[in-house]
Amino acid sequence: MKITVTEIEAQSRAALLNHGAGATQAAAVANAVARAEALGNVICGLYYLESYCTQLSSGRVNGTVTPEVSRPRPGAILADAKYGFAQPAFAAGLPEAVAAGLENGVVSLAVAHAHTCTSLGYFTEQIAAAGLIGIGFTNASPVVAPPGGNKRVIGTNPIAMTVPGDDGPAMHFDFSTSAVALGKITMAKTAGEPIPLGWAVDENGAPTTDPDAALKGALVSAGGYKGWGFGLMAELLAAGMTGSVNSLDVAGLKVAAGKPHDLGQFYILMDPGTYHDGFADRFVRIAEAVTAQEGARIPGADRHVMTEVDVPDALWDLVCELGN
């Protein structure tokens, strides 16, 4: 059925409140859910809401904690989520990070001890909305094996980057460093469909098209060793720089109960005018060369923000049930 994004946000907020989230926390997470749906990112939208609610009830995520923001160095902001949601922790740290970025030219924002942030690009686009270039990294529960291996070591470990433009992002990308997001494999299993070769390996390390075998085995990195390197970079920044846990130490992100996720996100904020005033000219030079080629585009250039989206009947019934 067709559901407005406004209604999605309202129903998501009601569900979170009904399961123990505070008003501020529920609003922040519901906004992220609605934004994901508006951009067609269904894996990070309503698909996650039941898990949020279940883990609120079990105590795996603290839905009422107030994040603590500190500034250990002039160009470094730390937002401690205290085992709560990532969205309110980021929101708490962003104003000081933006101010520090404008003051210093470059600043880092570490979000520590947080629940999964789900869509990393949701955060970098907020950095760009403040006029700064935003680059983000995070880790997740282990699902990716090293090239040539079959044991899970790191998460899908996405990287996102958003470049500010005159009327919204001039460039925006958000992708996992694995060949595919784990959710696409679970969705294929639910639908009874095979997956393409190159997404995953089975328990013996052999490539597979069977989503069930893939879920028992491991995902592989995008681009082999190249993607593996980017995944390790995200791991070291998200866990090492924030003091949060390694992917190896996180149970499945949707497991109902257990230890908090305790994940980290690491963001770099840069003022494009720090060294000279020609950043926009350099970007336009590249953009024009790309768009001059039929079928080519700058990442994020064709993003369409919807105000109404298709939601499966069963999923919407569940959302409404969660809020009652």
Image: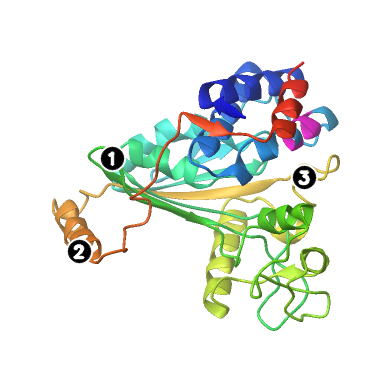
Is residue 52 covered in magenta?
Answer: yes
Q: Which residues are magenta?
A: 51-56
- Please tell me whether mark 3 or mark 1 is closer to you in this view: 3
Task: Say which amino acid is labelled 1.
Answer: Glu
- Please tell me whether mark 3 or mark 2 is closer to you in this view: 2
As helix, strand or loop, the secondary structure at mark 2 comes to loop
Q: What percent of the width, then of the height, locates residue 199? A: 65, 70
Task: Say which amino acid is labelled 2.
Answer: Ala
Q: CA distance from mark 3 to mark 1?
A: 40 Å
Q: What percent of the width, then of the height, locates residue 290? A: 25, 64
Query: In the picture shown, does residue 109 fall above or below 246?
Result: above
Q: Residue at x 56, y 71 (%)?
A: 222
Q: Are marks 3 and 2 in contact (CB under 8 Å)?
A: no
Residue closer to the observer: 235 or 320:
320
Task: Return the residue at label 2.
Answer: 292
The image's mark for residue 254 is 3
Q: In the rendered view, does 54 fall on the left or right side of 297?
A: right
Q: CA distance from mark 1 to mark 2?
A: 37 Å
Query: In the picture shown, does residue 119 fall above or below 203?
Result: above
Q: Earlier in the sequence, mark 1 or mark 2?
A: 1
Q: Earlier in the sequence, mark 3 or mark 1?
A: 1
Q: In the rendered view, does 153 fall on the left or right side of 228?
A: right
Question: In this orientation, does residue 58 appear?
Answer: yes
Mark 3, other Cα within 10 Å: few <14 / some 14–19 / many ≥20? some
Is residue 61 covered in magenta?
Answer: no
Question: In this orientation, does residue 20 appear?
Answer: no
As helix, strand or loop, the secondary structure at mark 3 comes to loop
Task: Say which amino acid is labelled 3.
Answer: Lys
Q: Quadrant of the C terminus?
A: top right
Q: Residue at x 77, y 42 (%)?
A: 260
Q: Earlier in the sequence, mark 3 or mark 2?
A: 3
